[in-house]
Amino acid sequence: MKECLLSWYGITDFKASLGIEKSGPLLGAILSTHYTEIQLLGYTNNAAESYSDEVFDSELASLNRNDTAEANNFVYKWANTQPAHHHFIKWLQNKVAENTKSITIGFTPVKLRKLNDTEGIYAAAVRLLESIAENSNKEDIYVTLFLSPGTPVMAFCWAMAALKFPQFRKRLIASPDPRKGPENIGLPQEWMEWYGKQMPLEHRNGKYFDMIFHLYGDQRIPTYLGLKQFNCKSHVFITSAGYHAVDIMKQFVKEDIELLELNVDAYNPKDVQDKLLKFIEEKDGVQNQKIGFNLTGGTKLMYAGSLNVCRQLGGIPFYFNTRDKKVIFLNDFSSKPIVKIEKVEFFIKLNGNGLSIGDSRGRMLQQADMISLTNYLWKRRAIINDIAGEIKKRYFKLLKPFVKEEITVFTDNNRNSYIKIKDRQYVFEDASQFKVYLTGGWFEEYVYNNLKNLVKTKKITDLHHSLKISYETNNATTLEKFLGLTKSENNQLYQELDVVFTDGNRLYVIECKSGRAEVEHIMKLENIVRYYGGLEGKGILLYINKVDNPIVVKKAAESKNVRVFDGDNIISKIEEFVGLYD
């Protein structure tokens, strides 16, 4: 990457080249960090055009530097002349070479009407920046504008010129203390907001950062979006101890992406600020990079401490508004669409470490037979509860057929199970799957099959049926009651989701109920959706029978993330519900 320092050079720098001062701000800035190119501007006095290098060299050779008056007279005579420029650039090149730095140094003399010719100074700064823009790829250059050398007007004009070139990755620096290295300088926020409105959106906020700091807490989706939204090689998660952010987020990035964790007191903004500043001070090169701050997650006090550091660094703060599907840049309130989360598994894996995901059931019949049977059972759902109740009571003891109107169910001596409807017979080789299917699994199949059209029309991007999420028992005991986890025969805790899908923006979880409606169903699904889908996750409770329990109806109306549907048109109701968030 091309790293370019732009600056005027001033009287103190000139004195340093003469040996009158120990060092000047310009040389100090060059030696303090890495640059590949230096471009300097030098005020040139129009009245001194006749001055020659020979006379300059002769008078310099006889100069008594210990005589303050003589030294000052020499500086006053020769400053801002062509011989002085030649001498200074040669001296600077030698000093850089002595420090084993390989840097290209360019110089442009600037003639002004007077020393503080604002128009002339601003025009010179803009011309230099335009020259760099014409000869460089903006993605591969980082520009540093050094404000200390020269007059206050020159510093002011650098700042104004910087606003004219928002496409550059850049920073402003100054040296308020000659004993220390330069510091980053931020422009007043009001200037940034005002000028930002004049610029095209694509210039204001690029798609890249050198480093992004993320507020990391219980809601992990904003952090995932921050990883995917921007081209960035280094990410730092600001979090509390125990969240293991790197362990969870590393599964979503390539191996060459740097992931770091910074533990802070989430309820102490000063602790957040101080630890961030210390991290930045100790991390080489951070102050010279384009920094982003993902302020979406974490606590409000983490937000306050991080925003303060962001302003000090001249970073770009942003916030993921998942409700409106936009990332908002808080420096100028511009926005762009959020990247999509295409897969259901990404939502799930964000909320656990070491969990596994798979389908809990295999196919019970050939696909065409299953769809045909399931669609028929939906039409005859009014009698299915009676059949399901008989199967629950008798299970493997259906050697004597059970008949309900035109539907007959039974098992044979080989433990094959059968459903016979009129003259058509369906065979289940696994009796346990037969029981699961007729006691409610068919309803899940019906919903799943009829939602496939939404995948074809791209209204949803990923769809699963009977998704099984298995946990390591020692990591999930606190979730067992909250999520309603089930314990298997080998004591493994798992969660089974009837139907789950995403439209690329939100996670939708559907629970299918063939029995009576209960308030606990809503409460459990609320927890599941919030845990796996975040603040914008949505749950859908489907009932075969009409929901007429007034307590359940009231609870459903009050729920912010769960909807309850019953009746004939449940598929169209789901489609309408998903369409609300297009």
Image (cartoon, rainbow, N blue to C red):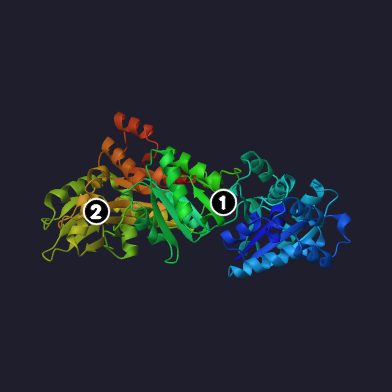
Q: Amino acid at mark 2?
A: Tyr
Instruction: Tell which of 422 and 577 is nearer to you.
Output: 577
Mark 1 and mark 2 residues within 8 Å of each other at the beta carbon: no
Q: Residue at x 14, y 54 (%)?
A: 395
* Residue that badge 2 annotates: 494
Q: Which mark is residue 457?
A: none
Dot 1: element: loop
Q: Amino acid at mark 1?
A: Arg
Image position of 232 (left or right of 173): left
Image position of 21 (left or right of 232): right
Binning the other alpha carbons within 10 Å of mark 1 as few (below 14), some (14 to 19) or many (20 upward) gives: few
Dot 2: element: strand
Instruction: Tell which of 33 and 527 is nearer to you.
Output: 33
Disc with the residue nearer the chain's start (1 vs 2)? 1
Of badges 1 and 2, the one in the foreground is: 1
Please determine whether, in this image, residue 73 is positioned above or below residue 560: below
Q: Residue at x 80, y 66 (%)?
A: 58
* Residue that badge 1 annotates: 179
Residue 569 rendering spot, x and y as whole percentages:
40, 44
Residue 269 rendering spot, x and y as whole percentages:
43, 39
